[in-house]
Amino acid sequence: MTVIALLSVAPVIEGSMASEVAAAVDELENYDVKYETNPMGTVIEAESTDELFAAAQAAHDAVDGDRVSTVLKIDDKRTRETSAATKVESVADELGREPTSQR
């Protein structure tokens, strides 16, 4: 089974959140997950929801602040294997090009 998720963890503060987001992303290294950070969050791939939830909680807990906002969106395909790259490739196939701006 492959579980794909979009995780966004950030302190609710004024100014740059980069150091706290970096702490959250760094925490993912302690788990058996693949991940890629983009401007809006981090895509995580795990073999089980247990591993995914543990990694997400660790990332949440790594952020220092009086208030922390965490959003977790999960795609749990239970009947077949998939990957984040495969999902993007499917969109590219439909478009006939890479799904990025041509400008």
Image (cartoon, helix red, strand yellow):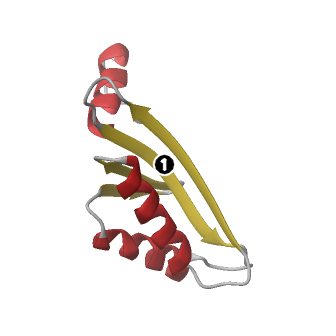
Could you say which quadrant of the image residue 4 lies in? Answer: top left
Up the image or down, 77 lies above or below 14; here it is above
For label 1, the crowd category at 10 Å Cα-Cα, with few meaning under 14, some 14 to 19 and many 20 or more, is: many
Q: Who's the residue at 60% across and 76% down the image? A: 17
The residue carrying mark 1 is 6
In the foreground, 102 or 29:
29
Q: Can see residue 33? A: yes
Q: Who's the residue at 27% across and 25% down the image? A: 80
Q: Which image quarter is the N terminus in?
A: top left
Q: Can see residue 102? A: no
Amino acid type of the residue that numbered disc 1 sits on in the rendered structure: Leu
Up the image or down, 16 lies above or below 91; here it is below
Secondary structure beneath dot 1 equals strand
Q: Position of residue 2 (x, y in %)?
A: 30, 39
Q: Position of residue 43 (x, y in %)?
A: 41, 50
Single out the residue that lies furthest toward the front.
50
Could you say which quadrant of the image residue 26 lies in? Answer: bottom left
Q: Which image quarter is the C terminus in?
A: top left
